[in-house]
Amino acid sequence: MMVAATLAAGMAPANLSTEPTWLNDYATAQTRVVALKKPMAVFVGSGKDGWGKVVKNGPIDPEINKLLANKFVCVYVDTDTDAGRKLATAFEVNSKGLIISDKAGTTQAYSLSGDMSRDELSQTLVKYAALDKEVQTTESVVRDRPVAAPAPVYYQPQYRQGYYTSGST
């Protein structure tokens, strides 16, 4: 009886992980997605703990961390590295963003280039953690488009204004 109670206590929801495990190898993450049948959440940022920079109004709160830890395979793409910049470019993310795959790891379900609020992150993660159907299209959000170059100034010849007279010379 004591063993059964101990085992049950070890499997209690309160003992689920509260911090996500951050992978930095995309191929390893894809293998885990297939094995665990969980969607992948790819956070793009820069520097140490750059995944938190996707949230614009403070750090990622504990409830979001718990959701990430239990429902997603988490990947951090650091754009301070060459490999990170290449992968971010492949995902069409400029400096920070979030990409979520389906549970098979074959299709992007969500793509964000830019940042988001904690509430928006929470709602997005809840939505895609519960997604059981096959993804047909990617929900794409772009907030940090590169600064557009100014429109080219075309050469406009300067005309000299001459004096016109009427009559004979």
Image: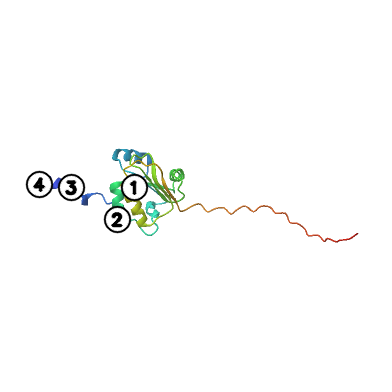
Under tag 3, what secondary structure?
A: helix
Q: Out of 27 and 114, give the one closest to the viewer.
A: 114
Instruction: Tell me the residue that label 3 is attached to.
Output: 10
Residue 15 drawn at (x, y percent) = 21, 50
- Determine crowd level at label 3: few under 14, some 14-19, many 20+ residues with C-alpha closer than 10 A: few
N-term mark: 3 or 1 = 3
93 in relation to 59, above or below: above
Whole-Å distance between the Cαs marked 4 and 1?
39 Å
Whole-percent x, y for residue 90 in the image: 45, 43
Secondary structure found at label 4: helix
Q: Is residue 19 visible?
A: no
* Disc 2 residue crowd, few under 14, some 14–19, many 20+, Cα 10 Å: few
The residue tagged 2 is 62
Residue designated by label 1: 128
CA gap, disc 2 and disc 4: 32 Å
Q: Residue at x 28, y 47 (%)?
A: 70
Residue 89: assigned label:
none
Foreground pick, 50 / 36 = 36
Amino acid type, mark 4: Met
Question: Do the residues under discs 1 and 2 have CB atoms within 8 angstroms?
Answer: no
**Mark 1 is on which residue type?**
Tyr
Taking the image as shown, residue 127 lies to the left or right of residue 93, namely left
Looking at marks 1 and 2 on the same chain, the residue that comes earlier in the sequence is marked by: 2
CA–CA distance in space, label 4 to label 3? 12 Å
Q: Residue 41: x percent and y percent? A: 36, 46
Which comes before the other along the chain, label 2 or label 4?
4
Circle nearer the N terminus (3, 2): 3
Return the residue found at the far left: 1
Quarter location, residue 82: top left
Instruction: Indicate the secondary structure of the residue bearing disc 1.
Output: helix
Instruction: Tell me the residue that label 4 is attached to.
Output: 2
Kind of residue at badge 2:
Pro
